[in-house]
Amino acid sequence: MDVDLVALVGLSAEDASCLQSLKPLMAGNQGDVINAFYGRILAFPRFKEMIEKTCEREQLDIGQLVSHINNVQFQHWQRFFSGTPDKAFKDFAQKIGTAHEKCLLSSDLYVASSAVILEKFIGLALGQHLGETTQAKEIMDALSAIVRMFFLDISYAISAYDNAAARTTLRQVSESLLNTFEVDVARGLGSMASAAEELNGTIKSIVDLNLGNMQRCRDTVSSIETLTKNLADLAVTTQQIENFVKVITDVSRKTKLLALNAAIEAARSGEYGRGFSVVANEVKALANEAENAAKDVKRQASDIQRAIDCAINQVTGSQKLVQEIDAGMATESEAIGFQNTAVREISTNLAIVSESAHGLRARFKTLDVA
């Protein structure tokens, strides 16, 4: 339930009448009051810096800014000394407060800097009622001391209020944000950790599969080497067969020559050499058959040799291909090993992030205590 600030400060109709009676005097001296205000605050570099930054942000020179502030303040003082705390007065007062906040003027500095304005107003009121007397001066000195100490007290208190309110707001906002952040981080980290674990398992499976494939490649290379050696041995054997064929061919040639000589001798012998001639013809026929068989064997041996050479070339190509596959798998396994290391680093970093997320709450608590 809101508190009526007008009733809380005790403002009455009599107060309104008093303020209205002072209005002409205050209106005639408001320039002196505002100048006293500027004379006080501009003695402090902090205020000069705020005014310069405001001019830069609003793209105004200092003269334009001061003129604008004076016009707004004079309008507000006219309402002030009308003694009517209506909605228009409240809205205008809050508008001035908002403008001061945009200039980065804190509430404690605003209250403390306003003391000089109240001093001037009290001095004008005393002068109107008591004149320039010793008693009036003594009263003014006493009231000025009270005003200064009172506004200093309020400035300290309101600074503490603002700081406490800011801490409370920070605590409320940060608590909600931290809860949401921790839940989101925990959920995200859990998903990432599961994904990293699955990826790690997949990588291990691929590594195991690659290792098996590499071993099979090496076994294949070994089998190919054995096959190549056997083919080479077969080629040697084929060459030996061709050598044997050469021997048989040479024997056949000599046998045919011998049969020819026998036939010639049989012809010379006439009737007595007829049987010998038959034998010579048979020997010649056998020699021809042996020669033809040798040619067939030689041709087949040549075909076998060409097939062996082709097979050796193909096997050699397959061996090189398998060796290249083996080398590629080795490189891939090395790359997968690097990925596995990266996954482990991700898991480590996730743990660090999780720890840091939990540490945020402790840091916010430290700020709250400060």
Image (cartoon, helix red, strand yellow):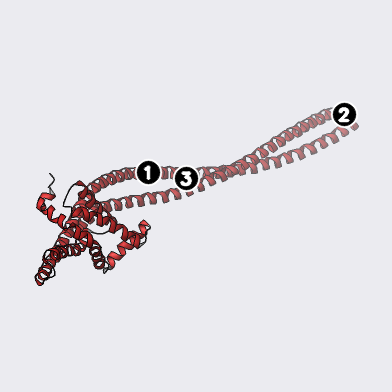
Which amino acid type is shown beneath numbered disc 1? Leu
Instruction: Give the image quarter of residue 1.
Output: top left
Mark 1 falls on what kind of element?
helix
Q: Residues within 10 Å of mark 1 (few under 14, many from 20)?
A: some
Which amino acid type is shown beneath numbered disc 3? Met
The total number of labels drawn is 3
Which of the two discs, 1 and 3, labels the residue nearer the N terminus?
1
Relative image position of residue 296 (x, y in whole percent): 72, 33
Q: Is residue 359 visible?
A: no
Relative image position of residue 54 (x, y in whole percent): 33, 59
Q: Is residue 236 left or right of residue 89?
A: right
* Residue furthest bottom as drawn: 134
Q: Residue at x 81, y 35 (%)?
A: 256
In the rendered image, the vertical position of residue 139 relative to residue 233, given as above or below: below
Residue placed under numbered mark 1 in the picture: 199
Q: Are marks 1 and 3 in contact (CB under 8 Å)?
A: no
Asked whether 30 or 302 is in front, the reply is: 30
Asked whether 77 or 21 is in front, the reply is: 21
Dot in front, 1 or 3 = 1
Which of the two discs, 1 and 2, labels the residue nearer the N terminus?
1
Q: CA distance from mark 3 to mark 2?
A: 82 Å
Relative image position of residue 295 (x, y in whole percent): 74, 35
Residue placed under numbered mark 3 in the picture: 214
Q: Residue at x 23, y 54 (%)?
A: 76
Residue 272 - label: 2
Which of the two discs, 3 and 2, labels the residue nearer the N terminus?
3
